[in-house]
Image (cartoon, rainbow, N blue to C red):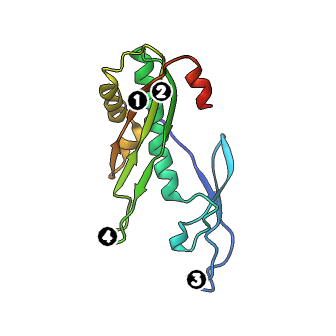
Amino acid sequence: MGEHTYRATVAWEGSTGGGYTAYTRDHDGGVPPAAEGLALSADPHFRGDASRANPEQLLVLAASSCQLLSFLHVAASARLDVLDYTDDAEGVMPQDVQPMRLTRITLRPRVLVAPGSDVSRFDELMGEAHESCFIANSLNTDVVVEAVVEIAATATDREEKS
């Protein structure tokens, strides 16, 4: 069947000659051909710039994005009309776990579906999406999904969320 390949690039410039506290953690990343010039740094706890994304955040974002795409796929296949999907995801990296790593990613999708939707299979569909999420399946981290579904009362509910 072949394989899929995903590219990413990073570029850093500076000097580590001054030791651990002296060099910049700021660097640029990209995912060619889509986006070049993503401003990246380290977590501020590791002397990074909080105004730039860090690798840990990108991992949480990847898990969240994958769950979204997987859910939209299973929802569309099940004829569940999703109007809006938001997630406030969070990754946790305890300092006392060695080697340091993200030990848990919690996804909190809030899903708005069309008026009159049958949501009786919502949890099943969300679980199916989680099971088929490529990123969650690639991680050694617990990925937990705490989803909430809301049924739009009217067609204008979607417009009000915008």
Quarter of the image for the N terminus: give it.
Answer: top left
Left or right relative to 131: residue 62 = right
Amino acid at circle 1: Val
Residue 84, position as x, y percentages in the image: 52, 28
Residue 112 to residue 147: above or below:
above
Left or right relative to 40: residue 112 = left
Are the residues tagged 2 and 3 within 8 Å (C-beta)?
no
Q: Earlier in the sequence, mark 1 or mark 3?
A: 3
Secondary structure of the residue carrying numbered label 3: loop
Q: Nearer the viewer, residue 24 or 130?
A: 130
Amino acid at circle 3: Thr
Amino acid at circle 4: Gln
Residue under numbered circle 4: 98
Image-quadrant location for residue 95? bottom left
Residue under numbered circle 2: 112
Quarter of the image for the C terminus: give it.
Answer: top right
Tell me the CA gap for discs 2 and 4.
40 Å
Secondary structure of the residue carrying numbered label 4: loop
Residue under numbered circle 3: 21
Which-is-in-front pick, marks 2 and 3?
A: 2
Image-quadrant location for residue 93? bottom left
Residue 38, position as x, y percentages in the image: 66, 53
Tell me the CA gap for discs 3 and 4.
22 Å
Q: Earlier in the sequence, mark 3 or mark 4?
A: 3
Residue 5 to residue 52: above or below:
above
User: Residue at coordinates 31% horizontally, 21% vertically from top-left?
Assistant: 121
Are the residues tagged 1 and 2 within 8 Å (C-beta)?
yes
Q: Earlier in the sequence, mark 2 or mark 3?
A: 3
Q: Earlier in the sequence, mark 2 or mark 4?
A: 4
Neighbourhood count class around disc 2 (C-alpha, 10 Å): few under 14, some 14–19, many 20 upward: many
Tell me the CA gap for discs 2 and 3.
47 Å
Amino acid at circle 2: Leu
